[in-house]
Image (tube, helix red, strand yellow):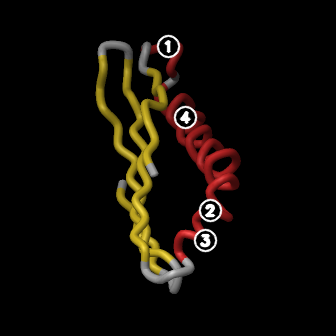
Amino acid sequence: MLGEIINRTVHCFWLMATERTGNGYVLWFAVYVKKLNWFTPIYMALISPLLKWIIYPAMLNGVRRRWEKTFHAGACGQSIAAAGAGR
């Protein structure tokens, strides 16, 4: 899944992808931000802690819960593990 956000401060892409492994799947998550003006680095410095500690973990935990509910991780051995995050 690829999402794009464009506003007056940032042009942002975020990516979520899965990769099949021997034990199930790995979830890859990456965020790419393009500077649009002088305020972009200040804006990112202010919101980065909120994103890293609250928003992204909540998003990824929601994906994991929905995955396990849909595929019954314990029953069929398909689990999902967060592999990496980029900024």
Please report the residue visible at 56 percent of the width from the left and 41 percent of the height from the top. 60
Please report the residue visible at 43 percent of the width from the left and 30 percent of the height from the top. 83
- Mark 4 crowdedness (10 Å alpha carbons): few <14, some 14-19, many ≥20: some
Please give the residue where the numbered disc 3 appears in the rendered image.
42
Asked which secondary structure carries label 1, the reply is: helix
> What's the residue type where badge 3 is placed?
Ile
Separation of residues labelled 2 and 1 (CA atoms): 43 Å
> What's the residue type where badge 2 is placed?
Ala
> What's the residue type where badge 4 is placed?
Arg
Please report the residue visible at 35 percent of the width from the left and 37 percent of the height from the top. 18
Q: Horizontal placement of 57 versus 27: left or right?
A: right
Separation of residues labelled 2 and 4 (CA atoms): 28 Å
Establish if 56 lies above or below 23.
below
Query: Percent x, y for residue 77?
Result: 43, 13
Q: Earlier in the sequence, mark 2 or mark 4?
A: 2
Q: Earlier in the sequence, mark 3 or mark 1?
A: 3
Query: Percent x, y for residue 26?
Result: 39, 29
Please give the residue where the numbered disc 2 appears in the rendered image.
45
